[in-house]
Amino acid sequence: MFPQLWETLKESITAYTGISPATFFTVVAVGLALYYIFSSLLSSSDNAHFQQTSDENMRPPVQLGEISEEDLKQYGGSDSEKPLLMAIKGQIYDVSQSRMFYGPGGPYALFAGKDASQALAKLSFDEKDLNGDLTGLGFFELEALQDWEYKFMTKYVKVGTVKKTVPASDGATKDQATGAAEHDAARSTEAANGDVRKPAEDGPSGSAAKEHVEI
């Protein structure tokens, strides 16, 4: 009975495929071999990615303290040896565990290495909004930013803060204001001690007039 089934199978293969049974089984064997090879490669790649992700999750977050915005850019994902950081409202968080989102090629990669407060508040991907300036934001935008901050506080570890820089013009204005205040205080002290001399109103002072007469 088996020989009859084998003959029937060979005839069916030839009738439906148009090739000989030997060729058919060779193609099937090659296909199965290729399938197992690619499956093994994909499995190895997935295991390597899982191992890398696990290592990043197990790596203790590095506490940076207070750093400048320029220093924060070093943690934007260009260096795989450094953690992936992002800031909201001046607070820096380690988002390495979500590298698929914030790392290179991810949908939110442009936020990494920056204080993206304004962009998150506006739900914007515009480069000009990638900063921590909250000036001019409306009520609903601030509410959206608050939701983002709460999410980061509960999911990621805070590792530092962004150093706030004071513009040079503001510093000069502050120094001028301080100097004016000190000058006014000195004048008030002189007035209290009776040391303030009344300026001449209608001509030279008495000593000057005396010298003029003697000449």
Image: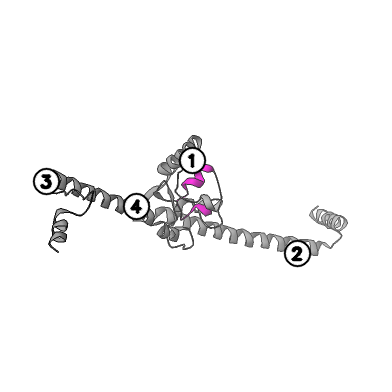
Whether residue 118 appears in magenta in the rendering, the answer is: yes
- Of residues 4 and 65, the one nearer the viewer is 65
Read off the magenta span. 109-122
Question: Could you tell which of marks 2 and 4 lies nearer the N-terminus?
Answer: 2
Amino acid at circle 2: Thr
Tell me the kind of residue under disc 1: Leu
Q: What is the x, y in percent for residue 80?
A: 47, 62
Which residue lies under the disc numbered 2?
A: 26
At 49% from the left and 37% from the top, the residue drawn is 138
Q: CA distance from mark 2 to mark 4?
A: 86 Å
Disc 3 versus disc 2: nearer the observer: 3
- Determine if the magenta segment contains residue 198: no
Instruction: Classify mark 3: helix, strand or loop.
Output: helix
Q: Which residue is mark 3?
A: 193
> Of residues 143 and 93, which is closer to you in this image?
143
Q: Is residue 140 above or below residue 193?
A: above
14 or 35, nearer to the observer: 35
The answer to which quarter of the image holds residue 150 is top left
Q: Earlier in the sequence, mark 1 or mark 4?
A: 1
Circle number at residue 173:
4
Give me the C-alpha separation between circle 1 and circle 4: 26 Å
- How far is disc 3 from disc 2 in space, using C-alphas? 113 Å
- Graded by Cα atoms within 10 Å as few (under 14), some (14 to 19) or many (20 or more), the crowding at tag 4 reads few
Question: What whole-number distance in Å separates the C-alpha atoms at marks 3 and 4?
Answer: 31 Å
Which mark is on residue 137? 1
List x then y, in percent, for residue 168: 37, 57
